[in-house]
Amino acid sequence: MDQALQTRWPMAEQDREISEAIARDEPRLRSFIRRRVPDRGEAEDILQEVFYELVEAYRMMTPIEQVTAWLFRVARNRIIDLFRRKQREAARTEPQRGTEDGDAQSLDDLLPAPNAGPDSAYARKVLLEELDHALDELPPEQRDVFVANELMGYSFREISEDSGVGVSTLISRKHYAVKHLRERLRDIYEEFRDQK
């Protein structure tokens, strides 16, 4: 009987820690995800995936020292996965966008490849974090249209139908978002580009 109690005690402790983490971090985490994922259903799916991974990590006895930081890191990774999946889907159905000289304009094309070694992985991580901070500085209506169009691959028409905002207004909002992001990220982008 003592052994059964000893086996159940760690599980009860894990359950308590998981419940405390969810209660403490769920509102901020939900807000974090919703600011980056315009579709409410997709945002909720990501939130549930993050909490599922937390439970799995505890059940596999994986030590997590800073649970809040871990939750936000997992959420950021799930959001990036969603953006990539949407980009791949859009690339299959729409022709490649390009600049006047024919260069690709996708975000992935501008970032260092994640599997090109530790320096590239570090540069990519820093650039994505800076992009995330720069996106947070935008007014919500500019951020939402930029994320939906540029990162998730929705057309202006689709965003307009979903939001009820006119296409010309959405294009204008994205223009201001791009202008801010270019100014905000120019120095760090040039620094990493010069190091290549």
Image (tube, rainbow, N blue to C red):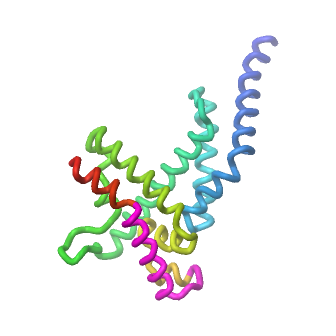
Q: Examine the rendered structure and indicate whether residue 158 appears above or below residue 92.
A: below
Start-end of magenta stretch: 162-184
Identify the residue shown where x is 43% and y is 69%. 180
- State the residue in front, 83 or 166: 166
Is residue 183 within the magenta segment? yes
Residue 119 left/right relative to 5: left
Where residue 23 appears, x then y in whole percent?
75, 45
- State the residue in front, 144 or 194: 194
Q: Examine the rendered structure and indicate whether residue 42 appears above or below residue 121.
A: below
- State the residue in front, 132 or 161: 132
Where residue 100 appears, x then y in whole percent?
21, 78
Image quadrant containing the N terminus = top right
Q: Examine the rendered structure and indicate whether residue 76 appears above or below residue 161.
A: above
Outermost residue to the left: 101
Residue 103 left/right relative to 151: left
Is residue 37 within the magenta segment? no
Identify the residue shown where x is 33% and y is 69%. 92
Q: How many marks?
A: 0
- Image quarter of residue 10: top right
Where residue 195 appears, x then y in whole percent?
23, 47
- Image quarter of residue 171: bottom left
Q: Which SS does the magenta portion mostly show?
A: helix
Where residue 129 appears, x then y in whole percent?
45, 51
